Structure formats: C-alpha cells, structure tokens
Amino acid sequence: MPQQVTVTEHIMLHQKRIPGATGQFSRLLNELVMSAKIIAREVTKAGLVDVLGFTGEINVQGEEVKKLDEYANRILIHRLSRSGVLCAMASEENADIIEVPDSLPRGDYIMIFDPLDGSSNIDVNVNIGTIFSIFRRNSDPEEPLLAGDVLQKGAEQVAAGYVLYGTSTMLVLTTGDGVHGFTLDPSVGEFLLSHPNIQIPEQGKIYSVNEGNYKYWSPSMRKALNYFKSNRNALKKPYSLRYIGSLVADFHRNLLYGGVFMYPPDVRDPKKPTGKLRLTCECNPMAFIVEQAGGMATDGVNRILDIEPDHLHQRVPFYCGSRNDVLKIQEIFEEEAKASAKKA
Ligand code: P6P
C-alpha cells in the first residue's frame, strides 16, 4: 500500500531542517492548511448559492458569494492572527500592513498573501487560488515592527506556496528544499503528498500571455511574443498558447508541463505602467517556487527575488517558468535595448 504522507507530517519532517524552528513554523502552516480547507468548502459551493440558498458564513445574497475573496481574506486574517506565530500580515485585499494585536499571542513570522487570486473567474467555474509568502521578522521583537520587516526582498522568504481550488484542491509548497504538491482528500479532510519534488521542464512548449494587450506592448515584448509564435525557436515550431487568466492556474500548468508565463508592462492602464501583478503577494512567492523547481523568474532584467520592494502593492513586469524560455526573453530584451541605444 503506498505510503500516505500528510502535509502535517511533511512539515514536521521538514521542520527538523529549519534551524531554530520551535514548532512555530509547523503551527503556522497547519493554520494555513485549516484556512485552505474552509475556503475550499465555500469555493466549491459558490455555484450553488441559488440552488442551496445558503452559503455558511456568507449571507444568502448571491453577490456575497461572489465576494469570496473578501470571505477568504477574513478567514485567513482570523485564523492566522490566532496561530500565535505571526507578528504581522499583509493582504492583497488590504491597503496596509495588518499587525497581530497584543491581545493575541504573537510570533516571529510574517505572512503576505493574496487570499483568492483570480476571484473574478468564480462565476465561470475557472480555477482560482490562494497565494502566500512567509518571512521571518528581522528587527527586535521587543521593538515596534518596521516596514522593512514586511518589505523584504523575495530571496529572504522562508516558505511560499499556493492553494489551487479546482477539479481537486491542491497545496503546492516550498520551504527552500524543493517543491511539493499535496492534494486534498475530502473524505478524510487531509492534504496528502501527491506530487513530491516537482521540477519544471528546462524547455517549455507553452506560452501564457494576454495577447489582447499586444498593441499596448513595447517593440521588444512584441519581438519576444513573435519568437514563441514562429518556427525560429527552440522547438522549430510555434509554441502552444494557453492562458486561463488566473495566475495560479496558468502557473501550476506550466510548472508541471513546462512553459513560460508573461505579464509585461503595457500602456493600457496608466495606473499600472509596470504591469498588473504585485511583487509581494504574487510574483515573489511564485518566483521562489519556480526557482526551487529549477525554473526562473525575472522582471525582464532582474531576478524577481533580488528586487527590494519599494511599497507593499508594488507591481512589476513578470516573466516566469522554464529556464530556457525565460533566458530567451531576457536575451531578446537585451538585444533590443542595445539596438535602441545604437540608434539613440
Ligand atoms: P488579465 C487575476 O485577476 C489576475 O490578477 C491573475 O490571476 C491573472 O494572471 C491576471 O490577473 C490576468 O490579467 O489582464 O490578463 O485579465
């Protein structure tokens, strides 16, 4: 009979390899797992609100169920605040850092999360996800929290992962020793190890980008896109385009099959000149995961994990996936920059 390893056992086994981990780390991840189970329960019912007429903690109005990202946010903040492990959190849904109040037990970790990324896809039953990033506090715990404790560069993450709510609910996690996938077995309510040591293929066959923004892109991004669509690439034939419009779903497919996800800067929305995706709650965790799986993640020039955040909701260009494909994008951008410099 195959060994069934729960995520809790995996964390406990791993904890031995986290220097100084006093069990805090395991408790934090276990609270996250509990939150994921609660969110998964509500997400799977989202389409039934008109049939069942109830939604558990969300009121019976249909539009409330569509605000599942608010619900997921409330669940995560409530449970993680009571883990006794965090001193602060930051959420894609909240403008400012959320400090754990003195009335609750506090710890030395900080979690940044997107509670339900891609939530606009709920109405059409497309996979959505929770993305998280975990840091240790650097400053003296006896002193007030510093912004720099939260705005650490991605290379300082101690763990990152996502929960993918879809045909099955999966937790994909790295604590710096590889990437491991756990699938929720609803019959026992446990996440079981289903994808140990995930490695992304070095060479992909898929590109993921919203081509609807083509006319808003730079010439170098258009050149990169045309590379993937041409016969003059590593495959000697066009890559396949796969774009779900939900980061966790697009990322997860590329992680397993190989491929590259791109969200470049565009001039479509002047409020988002550097792209749509957020550094701290989307790009950093995905970059940590993809590097641990043997892939790459850059902003087109810099390694995502080396970027020092300026502010909590900073947006960055994002190119992430199979190493050869991300390197090729960087090569095209470098060539275009040199050509432009010569013309100048
Ligand atoms: P677009 C979802 O809203 C999201 O934040 C990511 O999950 C996804 O990758 C991206 O936006 C899709 O954006 O502009 O292509 O619809």
Image: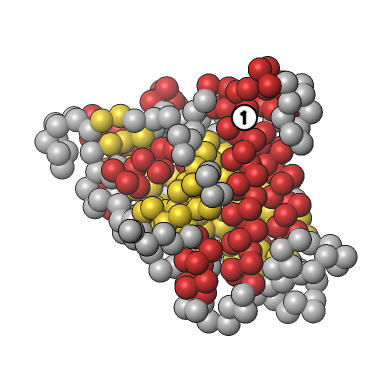
Q: Residue at x 76, y 69 (%)?
A: 106
Residue 27 vertical placement versus 59 (above, below): below
Q: Position of residue 285 (x, y in %)?
A: 50, 54
Look at the image and tell me whether residue 222 can be seen: no
In this image, 202 relative to 273: left or right? left
Q: Give the farthest residue toward the left.
A: 236
In the depicted view, which residue is nearer to us: 238 or 251?
A: 251
**Residue appearing at x 70%, y 76% in the figure:** 139
Which element is circle 1 on? helix
Q: Position of residue 77 (x, y in %)?
A: 73, 51
Q: How is the image coloured?
A: secondary structure
Q: Residue 295 at x, y = what percent?
A: 32, 55
Q: Can you tell which quarter of the image residue 151 is in?
A: bottom right
| Whether residue 213 is situated above or below residue 343 in the rendered picture | above
Residue occupying image coordinates x 56% and y 57%: 133
Residue farthest to the bottom? 20
Q: Which residue is identified by label 1?
A: 45
